[in-house]
Image: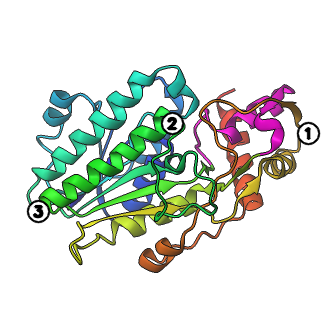
Amino acid sequence: MTVLVTGAAGFIGMHVSRVLLERGETVLGIDNLNDYYDPALKAARLALLEPYENFRFVKVDISDKDAFFDALQQADGVDRTVHLAAQAGVRYSLIDPYAYVQTNIMGQLNILEFARHREGFRHLVYASSSSVYGGNTKLPFSTDDRVDNPVSLYAATKKADELMGHAYAHLYDIPMTGLRFFTVYGPWGRPDMSVYIFSEKMMKGEPIPVFNHGDMKRDFTFIDDIVNGVVRALDSPPEAADGQAPQRVYNIGNNKPEPLLDMIAALEQALGVKARIDYQPMQPGDVRATYADIEATRRDLGFEPTTSLREGLEQWAAWYRAYKGQNS
């Protein structure tokens, strides 16, 4: 059988696809290869997957209903989906809000409809975000907490995805798992993420923007730990029980909030470059701290993050230098 991976040329999507391919799964990857950030990075990620005989790629926009369903007419054998395609980034949602509704909500609906009409469909795993916790102040963030105080449109669309997923699980008995990712970083990461932005500026000798005057904490989670959580979730479809729909939501995080200034210090050591810091006020849509409660994820999925921030940043720095050297 085949796993459909959306956003296969993306940061998490490429890594998930590669792990699935390595264990012998057949993977159908889709991506629209848009220019939200440099498409060359997406093409380079895709080039890592193309040599696998059990991989097939289709370029298509998940939010374009007709194109999406036309492209998947020949998607024989798809019985599971890992839905990672999305318009990411909190700050960009202040610039182009329409892109978030189009991709994150319409795209989610198309994926749900695909699962609904797929005979023998077994499980849909989709990406949510720690951003859904919004204005919550209780730490750590638990999936039992209310999440009805979003502070960005991005967060609102991700919460909408969870609600839509629950509705389809309830109505059509589709096993559904939403994963709230916490500040993912590592090799092949996105250029709009802080680790990438800081590395670029530090290597050029430019000041790095540090918001809320440095009073920030993030539950930085290394890509290998994220992928481990995704695959464990994929292999553990939820069942309906006690009147509940077969749908679950889990936090996938490192379970350790790190002060932003500590991350910068570790990045300085990994890159061998001193940072020049430009302290700035809090940005609209941002939050001071994130911290994942992963007790349910441990209990149900056997998930346990293993990569320290220092170890992860060392791997990031090695990849970054190599990638920039090849493309200089």
Residue appearing at x 77%, y 30% in the figure: 281
The N terminus is located in which quarter?
bottom left
Mark-to-mark CA distance, 1 and 3: 55 Å
Residue 37 seen in render = no
Q: Name the one closer to the observer, 79 or 24.
A: 79
Instruction: Please report contact status of discs 2 and 3: CB closer than 8 Å, yes or no.
Output: no
Location of mark 3 (residue): 120
66 vs 148: above or below: above
Q: Secondary structure at mark 2?
A: helix
Q: Secondary structure at mark 3?
A: loop
Q: Which residues are magenta?
A: 187-215
Circle 1 packing at 10 Å, graded few (<14), some (14-19), many (20+), is: some
Residue appearing at x 43%, y 33% in the figure: 87
Residue appearing at x 62%, y 63% in the figure: 140
Q: In front of the other: label 2 or label 1? A: 1
Q: In front of the other: label 2 or label 3? A: 3
Q: Amino acid at mark 1?
A: Lys
Q: Amino acid at mark 2?
A: Ala
Q: Is residue 84 left or right of residue 39?
A: left
Location of mark 2 (residue): 44
- Disc with the residue nearer the chain's start (2 vs 3): 2
